[in-house]
Image (cartoon, coloured by chain):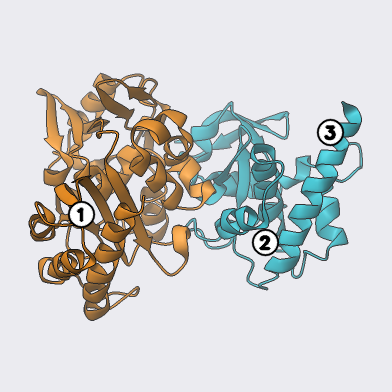
Chain colours: A cyan, B orange
Amino acid sequence: MRQLIRLIVNRGPYEVMVKPSETLIQVLRNKLGLTGTKHACDTGKCGACTVLLEGKPIRSCLTLAISVRDKEISTIEGLAKDGELHPIQKAFIEHGAVQCGFCTPGMIMFAKAFLEENPTPQEEEIREALSANICRCTGYVKIIEAIQAAAAMMKRRTSNTN
Amino acid sequence: MRDFNYFEPKNVDEAVSLLAKYGEAAKIMAGGTDLMVRMIMGTRRPKYIINLKATPGLDYIECGDELRIGATTTIRTIAKSPELAQECPIIANVGRKFACITIANMATIGGNLCNASPAADTAAPLITLSARVKIIGPDGVRIVPVEEFFTGPGSTVMKPDEILTEVQIPTPQADTKWAYIKYGIRGVSDLAITSVAALVNIENGIFTEARIALGAVAPTPMRARRVEDALKGEKTSEKTIDKAAALAKEECCPISDVRASVEYRTQMSYVLTKRAIMSCLNS
């Protein structure tokens, strides 16, 4: 049976009718029109559908929308502020860390949560953490470079504001 | 995915009565990382989903005379717990080898056990730790050793109207040496081809206690008693360890599947058991 639930996506509340069997990725893309998040393997293996639930990365393909009602969800659409790209987005562009682009939203959302937890990661730590997301173009080297550059950019930004 | 009715029980009693009411048509969901995959693929078609993760009071780590971990505590919480890193480092280590960060944020220790995969990462280490699970049903509470919990691939001693609520771990002695090795193609992000947990105590160069358990090489996670017996009371030499680890090949009974063959898993049981025990010596 359909139920009316409230989802808080990128700080905005949405009221939406869902069946309990609808996954978060289906609701984000098909009902809220937020198609930045990609739907790929549907088995939790690839990471393309990664969004943040209260700041932590989750697989939106394995999450029932009804189970995250009233909780804060962040997607790639909410990352840029006032028309300015987030440092991770800038770094991905500057370092050519985008080939076909399909894994990119998941990669960037994962990187955001990862860098918040570990703002100065070693390359090895980035490599290990990135096992969460698959890039079928295999452009991992550029992605790792972009995350390192984003970490440096975000550190500068924090020290400038302090 | 087939449609279902969805419940978020306010407490364990409510969850138990829902299970009692709907029987096998109902399924408990925690992190969803196993169950959702099956529901999407259509191999599981429950009519009722009971989301235990929404039930308050089951997400905790308590350290006292023994460690108590609530069933819906996520693997990521376990991996990052400073208390567990101090009191029971093998479990914190398993948390880091369990899966990628994203899956570990969702998956729970109770879900990993109840899913009852022979490759379940938390199982072999919990067996070596003599851990127990607390199970609540209509008739009350029962405590079952993890070693006796599994009955086959995907099956456990739990009845359809019972819920696993807690994992209890006797705090290991501070000088206990440990190792957990998970071997898979994609490292932490994959299911194990073979995994080995080893806990040993050593005094004056002699193994005074040894507990060894293996994953993914039998219908259930298994304890390797013959390997343990071959270590206890013996010197901590490579020769002793090699001979003992070779017994793992006789104790295991793996299958061939997409990940590896019987022969490969059998050989890896020996190789990884030896490696795990050797690394206990150096820890």
The one nearer the camera, B253 or B65, is B65
Residue annotated with mark 1 = B213
What amino acid type is highlighted by mark number 2?
Cys
Residue at label 3? A158
Q: Residue B137 bears which disc, if any? A: none
Residue drawn at point x = 60 percent, y = 44 percent:
A27
Disc 2: which residue: A103
Q: Are marks 1 and 2 on the same chain?
A: no
Quarter of the image that includes the N terminus of chain A: top left
Quick check: do tags 2 and 3 share a chain? yes
Q: Is residue B21 visible?
A: yes
Q: Say which element carries label 3.
A: helix
**Which amino acid, mark 3?**
Thr
In the image, residue A136 above or below residue A146:
below
Q: Nearer the viewer, residue B186 or A40?
A: B186
Picture quarter with the C terminus of chain A = top right
Letter of the chain that mark 1 sits on in the rendering: B
Residue ID at (19%, 64%): B241
Disc 3 versus disc 1: distance between alpha carbons?
47 Å
Quadrant of the rendered image containing residue B229: bottom left
